[in-house]
Image (cartoon, helix red, strand yellow):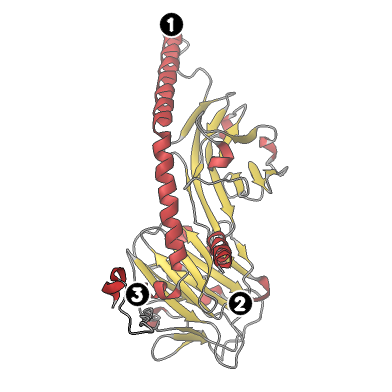
């Protein structure tokens, strides 16, 4: 029996893996034409990145990357100007590479055209994050003016100063590496415990809030109940069946600027199958104009999970993440952790964690709903029941309780 419990706990920990954060330097990286540069990027808490997908790309050219690593190797799909010039590298001599989550980019034979933004995106099973690093390119020898006889001395001075600074940074990193490793392990342990606790629906409901839909910003082709908790497509609306109706977004009347907030949504009603079409998440306050999918992005203030019938489940992250959810959720739980920048989704009936989106929220954020079109069932926001306290087991005999349990009597 004990071995079965251990196996279940291990599977649960694997299934509910902790989301990570992609970290990059806050300042631009500078290098000169013709040189080689390391563009640092790593994940925190540190974990082995060999099984993750790592994509470096420029601008919006995700499908034509500077470098793509997945399935344990570099893929031959690089943007032509970066062939044989880009690779993964260590950001410092103390780095453990992919084993420690170091996904830094090495660029050789730099050109003026390389100047600009580089996106570092790391994704895995149910976790994703990305950051942008700016690269500044200078002409070789730009430290000196050809007409200035002191130019070589200036260049030498800057070279010596740079080496000294790099040596000092390396010494500091080496000295405190053990301390940083301990801190990362403690953070990972804390986050793991929190995620395991979140799978308990009763624990989630301790953060439950009452949610209603804002009638003033409701799309005219949506029908809303009197209590502002049930919404569906109007009977007068005839959906062509081509494309998800993103314009049907409805907005929660509640706004959050901190803390944890949880709510549940019913997606299957008696005698009807679970809904095939829905969109649920959060939105930044005031972003009420919706036109199509391209307008609903995290940078525009939208974060959600969408069920698009035969097209499956996907997020609106950039790029989107497709999911295979079995069974289809009948009741969806949503947990907004504003302070930690996390939006989590749960299959309430199965007590199963589905997905956590890692982001950074600012300003007021509220619930986002879209009932889709053509389903028999509406979308209903539920009043979460009060958390059920574990029953106290009474002794089965008249014998007194042990002294270390007397406080529970």
Q: Is residue 150 or residue 97 the one in the foreground?
A: 97
Displayed quadrant of residue 253: bottom left
Q: Residues within 10 Å of mark 3 (few under 14, many from 20)?
A: some
Q: CA distance from mark 1 to mark 3?
A: 68 Å
Q: Which mark is residue 149?
A: 1
Seen from the viewer's position, the closer of residues 407 and 224 is 407
Q: Nearer the viewer, residue 409 or 24?
A: 409
Percent x, y of residue 397: 36, 84
In the picture as drawn, the residue positioned furthest to the front comes out as 399
Q: Secondary structure at mark 3?
A: loop
Q: Which residue is mark 3?
A: 254
The disc, 2 or 3, on the residue closer to the chain's N-terminal end is 3
- The residue that appears at 62% across and 63% down in the rendered structure is 322
Q: Residue furthest top?
A: 149
Q: Position of residue 119 (x, y in %)?
A: 54, 45
Please provide percent x and percent y for residue 149. 43, 6
Q: Please rate how many residues cluster around mark 2, counting C-alpha atoms within 10 Å: few if below 14, some from 14 to 19, many from 20.
A: some
Rate crowding at label 1 as few (under 14), some (14 to 19) or many (20 or more) other CA atoms within 10 Å. few
Of labels 2 and 1, the one closer to you: 2
Could you give the CA–CA distance between mark 2 and mark 1, rounded to whole angstroms? Answer: 74 Å
From the top left corner, tell me how far across and down residue 329 is, in percent.
57, 77
As drawn, is 399 to the left or to the right of 15?
Answer: left
Label 2 secondary element = loop
The label shown at residue 328 is 2
Q: Earlier in the sequence, mark 1 or mark 3?
A: 1
Q: For the residues marked 2 and 3, what is the alpha-carbon distance in whole angstroms?
A: 28 Å
Whether residue 289 can be seen here: no
């Amino acid at each position: 029996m004990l071995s079965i419990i251990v196996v279940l706990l291990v599977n649960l920990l694997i299934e509910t893996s902790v989301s990570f954060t992609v970290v990059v330097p806050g300042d631009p990286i500078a290098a000169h034409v013709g040189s080689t540069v390391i563009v640092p990027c790593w994940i925190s808490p540190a974990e082995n990145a060999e099984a993750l997908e790592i994509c470096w790309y420029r601008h919006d050219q995700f499908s034509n990357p500077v470098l793509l690593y997945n399935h344990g190797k570099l893929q031959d799909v690089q943007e032509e100007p970066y062939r044989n010039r880009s690779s993964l590298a260590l950001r410092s001599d103390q780095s453990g590479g992919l084993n420690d989550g170091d996904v830094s980019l090495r660029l050789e034979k730099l050109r003026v055209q390389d100047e600009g933004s580089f996106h570092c995106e790391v994704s895995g099973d149910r976790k994703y994050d990305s950051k942008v690093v700016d690269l500044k390119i200078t002409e070789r020898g730009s430290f000196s003016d050809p007409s200035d006889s002191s130019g070589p001395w200036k260049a030498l001075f800057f070279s010596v100063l740079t080496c000294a600074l790099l040596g000092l940074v390396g010494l500091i990193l080496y000295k405190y590496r053990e301390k940083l490793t301990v801190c990362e392990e403690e953070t990972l342990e804390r986050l793991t415990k929190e995620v395991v606790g979140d799978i308990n629906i009763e624990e989630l409901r301790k953060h439950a809030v009452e949610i209603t839909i804002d009638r003033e910003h409701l799309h005219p082709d949506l029908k809303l109940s009197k209590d502002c908790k049930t919404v569906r497509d109007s009977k007068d609306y005839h959906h062509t069946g081509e494309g998800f109706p993103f314009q049907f977004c409805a907005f929660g009347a509640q706004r959050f600027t901190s803390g944890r907030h949880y709510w549940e949504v019913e997606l299957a009603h008696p005698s009807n199958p679970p809904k095939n079409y829905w969109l649920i998440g959060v939105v930044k306050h005031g972003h009420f104009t919706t036109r199509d999918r391209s307008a609903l992005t995290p940078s525009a203030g939208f974060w959600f999970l969408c069920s698009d019938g035969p097209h499956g489940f996907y997020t609106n992250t950039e790029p989107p993440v497709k999911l295979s959810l079995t069974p289809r959720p009948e009741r969806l739980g949503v947990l907004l952790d504003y302070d930690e920048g996390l939006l989590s989704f749960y299959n309430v009936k199965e007590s199963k964690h589905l997905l956590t989106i890692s982001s950074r929220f600012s300003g007021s954020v509220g619930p986002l709903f879209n009932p889709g079109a053509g389903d028999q069932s509406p979308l209903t926001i539920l009043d979460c029941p009060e958390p059920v306290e574990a029953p106290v087991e009474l002794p089965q005999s008249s014998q007194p309780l042990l002294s270390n349990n007397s406080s529970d009597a």
